[in-house]
Amino acid sequence: PSEGQIFISSNMDLDNLTIEIRDTKGRLIMYDLGKVINNKSPFAMDINSLASGLYILRIHNSSYMYSKLIQKL
């Protein structure tokens, strides 16, 4: 659960990522493009503007895809 920010890191070097937050009906709520993530430089995403509830975090590029359910308090 998070109240305002989520932090994303990876033990792999991932570049040119699209990071999406979708509601549980699949509607796109927020996104960020062209991000680079690794264990040395985690990416912080501000979710203060979201209402409390469950969301789907989706991170992908041309060769990688990851999804996780997150909760905004």
Image: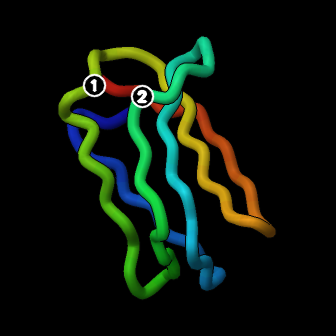
Task: Label 2: state its secondary structure.
Answer: strand
Viewer-closest of 53 and 19: 19
Q: Which of the two discs, 2 and 1, sits closer to the camera?
A: 2
Question: In the image, residue 32 lies at what x, y percent?
Answer: 41, 54
Q: Residue at x 57, y 73 (%)?
A: 16
At label 2, the amino acid type is Ile
Q: Is residue 60 above or below residue 27?
A: below
Colour scheme shown: rainbow
Viewer-closest of 1 and 55: 55
Q: How far apart, in angstroms, are the residues tagged by discs 2 and 1?
A: 8 Å
- Residue that lies at the very extreme toward the right in this rendered image: 63
Q: Is residue 71 above or below residue 51?
A: below
Q: Check contact, mark 2 vs mark 1: CB within 8 A.
A: yes
Q: Taking 60 as reference, is 33 left or right?
A: left
Question: In the image, residue 55 lies at what x, y percent?
Answer: 49, 26
Question: In the image, residue 64 lies at what x, y percent?
Answer: 76, 64
At label 1, the amino acid type is Leu
Q: Residue at x 57, y 16 (%)?
A: 24
Task: Label 1: state its secondary structure.
Answer: loop
**Numbered mark located on residue 65 in the image:** none
Mark 2 or mark 1: name the one nearer the start of the chain.
Answer: 2
Q: Taking 57 as reference, is 30 left or right?
A: left
Q: Which residue is mark 2?
A: 29
Where is residue 71, by image quadrant? Answer: top left
**Numbered mark located on residue 50 in the image:** 1
Q: Is residue 34 above or below residue 48?
A: below
Question: In the image, residue 72 lies at what x, y percent?
Answer: 34, 27
Point out the image quarter for the C terminus.
top left
Q: Residues within 10 Å of mark 1 (few under 14, many from 20)?
A: some
Point out the image quarter for the N terminus.
top left
Q: Residue at x 61, y 84 (%)?
A: 13
